[in-house]
Image (cartoon, rainbow, N blue to C red):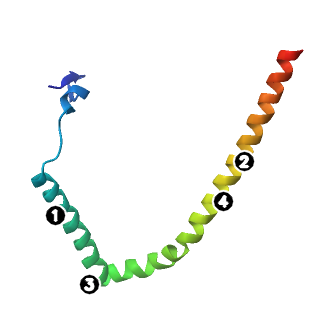
Amino acid sequence: MGGHDNGLAYWSDEDWRGACLDDRSRALMAACVGAVGGGLWGWLYLTENGGAVRRRIGPSLDRLPDDIKAVRTSADKTSAVLADVRNILEDVSALGTHA
């Protein structure tokens, strides 16, 4: 089964081979996720404290698509700069081998 490292049990890859969830485990996991999600929804929409949290985070959620777009734009610009740097380094490397 597992081994011990510094007094702590750990699982090796061999221990997990063939391990899979059966239908009952999946159903139990889905029920737990559903219960947590339902409880969170109920708290947010059916309690005074949940309503206060909704009002506080609402504007942030409204800005989320714009923020995601800004991150994508930054990532695209960063990728372009890194490609340029890579090309420059390849050019410099090529010059060094021809000298």
Residue type at mark 4 is Thr
Instruction: For marks 4 and 1, give the CA distance.
Output: 39 Å
Q: Position of residue 98 (x, y in %)?
A: 87, 16
Label 3 and label 4: CA atoms lie apart by 38 Å
Counting residues from the N terminus, which is met first, the one under dot 1 or under dot 3?
A: 1
Which residue, given by chain and number where applicable, does mark 1 sit on? Answer: 31
User: Crowdedness of circle 1 by 10 Å Cα count: few (<14), some, many (20+)?
Assistant: few
Q: Mark 3: which secondary structure?
A: helix
Q: Split into 4 quadrants, where in the image is the C terminus?
A: top right
Q: Which residue is mark 4?
A: 73
Pointer 3 with pointer 4, Cβ within 8 A: no
Marks 2 and 1: in contact by CB < 8 Å? no
Which quadrant holds residue 54? Answer: bottom left
Q: Is 14 left, or right, of 90 in this rendering? A: left
Estimate the spatial distance between the alpha carbons at disc 1 and disc 3, rounded to whole Å. Answer: 21 Å
Q: Which mark is residue 80?
A: 2
